[in-house]
Image (cartoon, grey):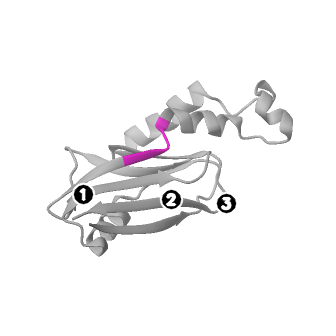
Amino acid sequence: MKSLTDYLWMEIPGRRGFVNITPDIAALVRKSGVQEGLCLVNAMHISASVFINDDESGLMHDWEVWLEKLAPHAPTSHYRHNDTGEDNADAHLKRQILGRETVVAITKGKLDFGPWEQIFYGEFDGNRRKRVLVKIIGE
């Protein structure tokens, strides 16, 4: 059994953003030498997300609009969490919608995706450095 643990560091300028991290993850799979196994990619912060979807600019815009309708940032007074002095309750809710992590199969040394699938980091409370855990295991 082989394994690799590594971290990506993300620092998104501005409050929100989406980054396609697939090339970074694919490079780590190659580095691991795993031919058959699993790759876990996990946002290590409660106001960020890792998820799989299509890398299409219109869709990225749609995510932003849809998430903002579901959990608008303002007015911040609508959220009890923000009574603590924070202003990021919406970021916690957006993270719950898109999820904390994803697991992708590794087949023949490569990420085994369906058509159009890519791995994304979603940031909902940016302007600071955050970690993404990558854990690869297999043969």
Q: Is residue 137 left or right of residue 73?
A: left
The answer to whether mark 2 and mark 3 are in CB contact below 8 A is: no
Q: Is residue 138 left or right of residue 13?
A: left
Query: 10 or 106, which is in the foreground?
Result: 106
Q: Quadrant of residue 137?
A: bottom left
- Mark 2 or 1: the one toward you: 1
Disc 1 or 3, which lies upstream in sequence?
1
Query: 11 or 4, which is in the foreground?
Result: 4
Q: CA distance from mark 2 to mark 1?
A: 19 Å
Disc 2 or 1, which lies upstream in sequence?
1
Going by the numbered disc 1, the residue's amino acid type is Gly
Q: Name the element at disc 1.
A: strand
Callout 1 environment at 10 Å: few (<14), some (14 to 19), or many (20+)? many
Above or below, comparing residue 90 to residue 115 in the picture: above
Residue 100 colored magenta? yes
Residue 82: % across, % down = 80, 35
Q: Name the element at disc 3.
A: loop
Q: Quadrant of the C terminus?
A: bottom left
Q: CA distance from mark 2 to mark 3?
A: 13 Å
Query: 46 or 87, which is in the foreground?
Result: 46
Range of the magenta residues? 98-102
Residue identifier under label 1: 37
Q: Quadrant of the N terminus?
A: bottom left
Disc on res. 128: 3
Going by the numbered disc 3, the residue's amino acid type is Arg
Residue identifier under label 2: 132
Callout 3 environment at 10 Å: few (<14), some (14 to 19), or many (20+)? few
Q: Which residue is painted at 48% across and 37% down in the image? A: 98
